[in-house]
Image: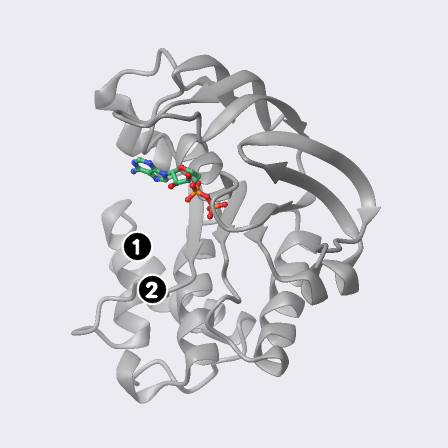
Amino acid sequence: MMISLDHVTKVYRHAEHAAVSDVSIAIDKGEFTFLVGPSGSGKSTLIRLILREERATRGRIDVLGHNLSTISSRKVPFYRRKLGVVFQDFRLLTNKSAAENIAFSLEVTGRSRGYIRQAVPDVLRLVGLDGLGDQMPNELSGGEQQRVAIARAVVTKPDLLLADEPTGNLDPDTSRGIMTLLERINAGGTTVVMATHDTDTVNRMRRRVIELERGRLVRDEDRAGYEVAR
Ligand code: ADP
């Protein structure tokens, strides 16, 4: 089991309601899972719990063999290096080129310069940005910036890729390209968990859908779609 949540509840300090309420989920290696629900339903909180940026108030979370309730603070940075993360707003370092952004995530994990010199062009090719390594983030389109962010997240070969609304700032065409890329990464063996409220994307992909409503799990279905009541 890659991710296991057992009766997990998260109540933020000073909050009246639980952001995540009694959620139990098991995600296997190699799965592609959508986490859906309206804004405020708890998707980002679940991602932050899995990243161990937040701690569960109740219940137990295990990821990649680590019990996140008992993992020591000293080990958390090492734990996080096993995960890749992508966000809606890309979060690239604006003063570094595309290639430098990607190289940086390898430098942090102590890879050699020789390794980095080879790995960066390889991953740029993988994400369809061949030849754009020297561009600065502000010289790239939104879709290209998200490809850089994805390259940076996967260049360390994580077992698990977490994506929080990765297509949220992109037009439908560009979103489709990003989803094709995430599908390809998943086909290579990386487990993908993607939070989104984009019904079109979910309906096109027909993957496992875990739906939240006010912090509660209301649906967990394979090869599913996503409808929003209007
Ligand atoms: P989603 O990602 O589905 O939009 P969130 O996980 O961001 O949902 O939010 C779930 C609930 O938790 C919301 O009611 C939100 O206002 C609340 N919340 C999120 N982050 C915090 C925080 N840092 N402190 C207090 N409440 C928060």
Residue 73 lies in quadrant? top left
From the top left corner, tell me how far across and down residue 168 is, in percent. Answer: 50, 66
Spatial CA distance of label 1 from label 2 is 6 Å
* Nearer-the-camera pick, 203 or 65: 203
Identify the amino acid type marked 2.
Answer: Ile
| Above-or-below relation of 220 to 132 | above
CB of mark 1 within 8 Å of CB of mark 2?
Answer: yes
What residue lies at 48% left-to-right and 69% top-to-bottom? 122
Circle 1 residue: 105
| Above-or-below relation of 183 to 159 | below
Residue 65 visible (yes or no)? no
Q: Residues within 10 Å of mark 2 (few under 14, many from 20)?
A: many
Give the SS element for disc 2.
Answer: helix
Ligand 1: which quarter? top left
Circle 2 residue: 102
What residue lies at 42% left-to-right and 31% top-to-bottom? 49
From the top left corner, tell me how far across and down residue 221 is, in percent. Answer: 80, 38
Q: Classify residue 119 as left or right of residue 7.
A: left
| Above-or-below relation of 33 to 64 | below
Q: How crowded is mark 1: few (under 14 residues within 10 Å), some or many (20 or more)?
A: some
Identify the amino acid type marked 1.
Answer: Ser
What residue lies at 36% left-to-right and 30% top-to-bottom? 52
Q: Is mark 1 within 8 Å of ligand 1?
A: no
Give the SS element for disc 1.
Answer: helix
